[in-house]
Image (spheres, rainbow, N blue to C red):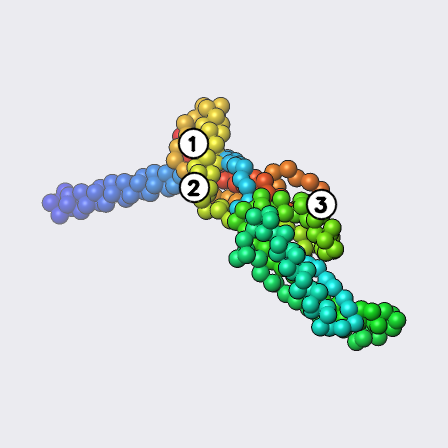
């Protein structure tokens, strides 16, 4: 065997060994990727609820008068407005919390289906809405509960109309979000730890997290009564978190 042949054989052996090494490396890398894809994890939900009270209230007060003389009707509606404002002041509601939201005039003569005889006594119907906005919802509630005094004064409120009902809102959601998210996350982790324990595993890091949507509910649900009609409310959030299992 010549020296040249010996060198060629050594080159072939080296190339073969390198090829085998590359193939094995490729196998292990591929095997590792499969393991990563099949990593075990657990998905859990964490609940957080807190009770709150509305911090803003709106009360649209709608009332009407009718007369055959538009000037008289306007004077009458202005007199009713004064009576309502005086009533609200007695309930602790300030002037700057009361505004005229709208005033409408209906001429019944323009309605072909109106009772022609009634036109002599109440041709014009003037309707006005006062909007009360307060950062003290309980004052609004007390005023609503005392609205019978307005009826005694001859003011018939359009209280049965949906748009004339008071609305109570909770606007400080951003103030409670951090605490609620922390609590929901903590509750989710407790559930995940229990699952891992039962499965004979250890809880790893977070794989995925979804904060969830915040919802405001009536604290005492009543059929036919919306959350915005209640001062007492419950804020709820459900977070979804996935943890690796080791």
Query: Toward the viewer: 208 or 158?
Result: 158
Residue hosting label 2? 178
Label 2: how many residues lie within 10 Å, few (<14), some (14-19) or many (20+)? Answer: few
In this rendering, the answer to whether 171 lies above or below 24 is below
Residue hosting label 1? 245
- Tag shown at residue 32: none
The picture places residue 49, in percent across and down from the top left corner, at 53, 36
In this rendering, the answer to whether 50 lies above or below 153 is above
Tell me what residue is drawn at x 61 percent, y 41 percent: 218
In this rendering, the answer to whether 193 lies above or below 117 is above
Separation (CA) of disc 3 from disc 2: 32 Å
Left/right placement of residue 229 relative to residue 173 reads right
Mark 1 residue element: strand
- Tag shown at residue 224: 3
Label 3: how many residues lie within 10 Å, few (<14), some (14-19) or many (20+)? Answer: few
Tell me what residue is drawn at x 43 percent, y 31 percent: 245
Mark 2 residue element: helix
Q: Earlier in the sequence, mark 3 or mark 2?
A: 2
The picture places residue 50, in percent across and down from the top left corner, at 52, 37
Separation (CA) of disc 3 from disc 1: 47 Å
Tell me whether the residue at label 3 lies in contact with that at label 2, contact meaning CB atoms closer than 8 angstroms: no
Tell me what residue is drawn at x 71 percent, y 48 percent: 148
Query: Toward the viewer: 148 or 30?
Result: 148
Residue 19 location, quadrant: top left
């Amino acid at each position: 065997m010549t020296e040249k042949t010996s060198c060629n054989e050594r080159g072939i052996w080296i190339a073969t060994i390198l090829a085998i090494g590359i193939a094995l490396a490729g196998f292990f890398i591929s095997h590792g990727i499969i393991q990563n894809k099949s990593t075990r994890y657990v998905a859990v939900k964490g609940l957080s609820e807190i009770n709150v009270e509305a911090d803003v209230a709106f009360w649209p007060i709608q009332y009407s008068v009718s007369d055959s003389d538009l000037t008289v009707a306007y004077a009458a509606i202005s007199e009713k407005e004064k009576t309502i404002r005086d009533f609200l002041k007695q309930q602790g509601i300030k002037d700057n919390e009361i505004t005229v939201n709208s005033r409408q005039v209906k001429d019944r003569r323009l309605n072909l289906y109106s009772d022609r005889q009634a036109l002599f006594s109440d041709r014009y119907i003037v309707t006005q809405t006062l909007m009360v906005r307060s950062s003290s919802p309980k004052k609004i509630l007390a005023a609503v509960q005392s609205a019978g005094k307005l009826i005694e004064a001859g003011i018939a409120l359009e209280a049965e109309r949906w748009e004339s009902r008071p609305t109570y809102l909770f606007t400080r959601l951003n103030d409670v979000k951090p605490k609620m998210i922390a609590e929901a996350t903590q509750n989710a982790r407790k559930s995940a730890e229990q699952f891992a324990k039962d499965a004979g595993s250890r809880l790893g890091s977070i794989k995925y997290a979804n904060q969830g949507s915040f919802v405001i509910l009536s604290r005492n649900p009543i059929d036919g009564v919306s959350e915005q009609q209640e001062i007492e409310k419950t804020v709820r959030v459900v977070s979804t978190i996935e943890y690796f299992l080791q």
